[in-house]
Amino acid sequence: MKLSRFILPLLLCLLTAGLSACGPDASELNTSGLEKLKQKDLDGAFEDFSKSIEKDPSFPEAYLNRGFVYGNRGELQDALADFNKAIELDSNYIEAYFNRGFIYGYFEEYKKSDADFSKVIEMNPGDSEAFINRALIRSRMGDSEGEIDDLKQAALLGDPGAQHWLKEHNVSWE
């Protein structure tokens, strides 16, 4: 009799613990967060990305996505920390370099921003947006030659904004 009084609660406890451990995995939580982000539910997305990180602290996509939410909230230091962590976990994570380049540009850390956009271009030379963003950073650094070179490359890649700017300033790119 005494033994059964302890076994039943123990079994219930084990069953409950097992069920809670069977919840969504890190990837599913990340996907759920992305869906909430599409619905502009920043708080719900943030919660799912944070839970994803709790489940798997080595999942770079969750850090990138949570960093994006931090950025949208104006919490740029936290966004930067998450982009750094995503890059630490995956040194070839183009989107993390791209987003970190934006943050560095905002903080007027232009050399770091330039380096991040250069890394994106190195990994994906067809990314006209990276050329545009690096051109803007180089403009702020006073490197007008680098700015024009990047705008020319973006124009060659078909970016209409770069093409328009170059036409307006009588600069040939073809």
Image: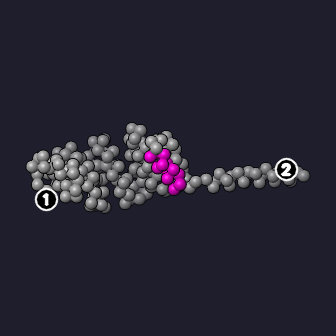
Per the rendering, the mark at residue 174 is 1
Q: At numbered mark 2, what does the secondary structure look like: helix, strand or loop?
A: helix
Say which residue appears at 33% left-offset and 45% top-offset.
103
Q: Residue 137 versus residue 148: which sits nearer the camera?
A: 148
Callout 1: SS: loop
Membership of 28 in magenta stretch: yes
Residue at (30%, 53%) from the top-left corner? 116
Percent of width and height locating residue 18: 68, 55
Q: Residue at 40%, 50% (x, y): give it.
A: 83
Indicate the quadrant where residue 156 lies.
bottom left
Asked whether residue 111 is in view, the answer is: no
| Quadrant, the C terminus | bottom left
**123 vs 117: above or below:** below
Where residue 173 sits, quadrant-wise, is: bottom left
Q: How is the image coloured?
A: one colour
**Badge 1: how crowded within 10 Å, few (<14), some, or many (20+)?**
few
Which residue is more in the foreground, 26 or 104?
26
The region drawn magenta spans 26-38
Q: Percent from the top left, x then y, of residue 5?
A: 85, 50
Extreme residue in the left direction: 170
Residue 5 is labelled as: 2
Which residue: 39% across, 42% down? 71
Residue type, numbered disc 1 = Glu
